[in-house]
Amino acid sequence: MRKQTARVLTIDMGNTRTKMGLFEAGRIQQSWRMLNASLEEELKKNLSPLSSTEKLVVGWMQVSGGREVPELEAWKRFGANCCFVHIQRHTPLPISSAYQTPESLGIDRLVAVVAAKAHYPSQPVLVIDAGTALTFDVATAAGRYLGGSIAPGIRMRFRALHTFTAKLPLIEEIDAFSLIGNSTRSCILSGVLGGIVAEVEAICGQYQARFGHELKIGLTGGDMEFFENHLKSVTFADANLNLNGIYHILKHNSYV
């Protein structure tokens, strides 16, 4: 493949929101977050000037897999000066994998681990993605992805208590909590938030026992800030971890 010297745009398309990052000289210079419903408009407004001035490499992935992306297809029609690269399950990665069902493994989980290994190439890494789901993904010091776990995220736990009981209210915002709640609301906050913090700390402890003190633990996802403020085991936090991971995959495949 032909090596590019252009600027690089990485796009992480979630189920409802999209994140984008513009890289120059290997570092993210700008980032955008938007609802998927406004994606085509945002692409035209913010990014079409980039593709009209110089070559732009666009690396993108979508969490939902194979759905059509009409917003991106529309941009391709006027982004003639762009090289589009779809990061998918079969895309060559700078890590190997021992996962037994790769066809059901979300590409976002692998991309996050790629980014963490770029930060710590000689250490084992554990990535915690605190979003709708709470995922743990681990790779060895040699760069072999082993797998991890998937659990309900904070808002899913709030919603489950409301949905599967007759009278418990729906809590929609993360708030301060204490060990002992003295109202229904504070009891839910204590159970969900205190419980998930204790759960994550315990799981991190198990990983540290297995991989030793060299293990680097990273945080990302929409609820990253909450966990960053309450966990003792975390080495680093990066809201743009997936955007960085896409960049390193493009680099591995000689697009940059």
Image (cartoon, rainbow, N blue to C red):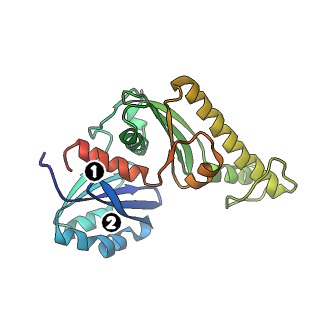
Q: Amino acid at mark 1?
A: His
Q: Amino acid at mark 2?
A: Glu
Q: Quick check: 131 left or right of 181?
A: left
Residue 207 pos. (x, y %): 56, 29
Question: Nearest the camera: 217 or 68?
Answer: 217
Q: Quadrant of residue 50?
A: bottom left
Q: Quadrant of residue 175?
A: bottom right
Q: Residue at x 23, y 64 (%)?
A: 76
Q: Given the current orientation, which residue lies at the most extreme top position? A: 210
**Residue 105 appears anywhere in the view:** yes
Question: Nearest the camera: 44 or 199?
Answer: 199
Q: CA distance from mark 2 to mark 1?
A: 14 Å
Q: Given the current orientation, which residue lies at the most extreme right position? A: 182
Q: Residue at x 21, y 50 (%)?
A: 256
Give the labeled residue for mark 2: 71
Q: Given the current orientation, which residue lies at the most extreme left position? A: 2
User: Secondary structure beneath disc 1?
Assistant: strand
Residues tagged 2 and 1 counted as in contact (Cβ below 8 A): no
Residue 17 pos. (x, y %): 46, 61
Give the labeled residue for mark 1: 86
Q: Quick check: 137 left or right of 247?
A: right
Q: Quick check: 47 left or right of 254?
A: right
Please say if 107 is above or below 140: below
